[in-house]
């Protein structure tokens, strides 16, 4: 975790921290927590599907995988929108 610096912090505010992880570690955490996700279950499934399309480091991503990754990105954006998510927006 690392602290976040605000431009105009109020002396009343507590220090904010951000925790970031990516790649293999994020996949490990998502897989471990997946059975416990209720609200973010579909989000985690999309993230894991995206992760499955990642190639080896230094390799170019195949065109078919780029198209699939873009669809997953759009699907995650729809899931993150405010409002009600319809059933046809489920993970494929």
Image: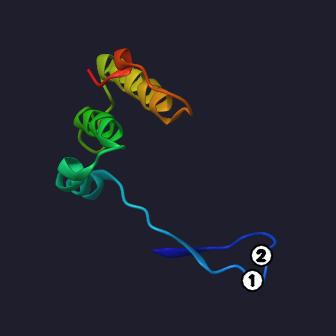
Q: Quadrant of the C terminus?
A: top left
In the image, 37: left or right of 82? left
- Quarter occupied by residue 81: top right
Q: Position of residue 21 (x, y in %)?
A: 37, 60
What percent of the width, then of the height, locates residue 69? 37, 26
Residue 9, numbered label: 2
The residue located at (37%, 23%) in the rendering is 66
> Measured from the top left, where is residue 82 in percent x and y?
56, 34
Q: Nearer the viewer, residue 92 or 21?
A: 92
Which quarter of the rendering shows the N terminus?
bottom left
Quarter where residue 44 is shown: top left
Which of the labelled discs sits on residue 12, or is there none? 1
Can you name the residue that lies furthest to the front here? 84
What separation in Å lies between label 2 and label 1 (alpha carbons)?
8 Å
Q: Is residue 16 above or below residue 28?
A: below
The foreground one among 37 and 8 is 37
Q: Residues within 10 Å of mark 2 (few under 14, many from 20)?
A: few
Answer above or below: position of 44 versus 17: above
């Amino acid at each position: 975790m690392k602290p976040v610096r605000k431009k105009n912090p109020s002396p009343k505010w507590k220090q904010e921290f951000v925790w970031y992880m990516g790649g293999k570690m994020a996949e490990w955490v998502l897989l471990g927590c997946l059975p416990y996700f209720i609200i973010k279950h579909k989000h985690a499934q999309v993230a894991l599907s995206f992760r499955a399309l990642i190639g080896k480091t230094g390799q170019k991503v195949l065109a078919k995988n780029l198209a699939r990754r873009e669809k997953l990105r759009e699907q995650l954006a729809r899931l993150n929108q405010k409002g009600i998510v319809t059933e046809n927006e489920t993970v494929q």
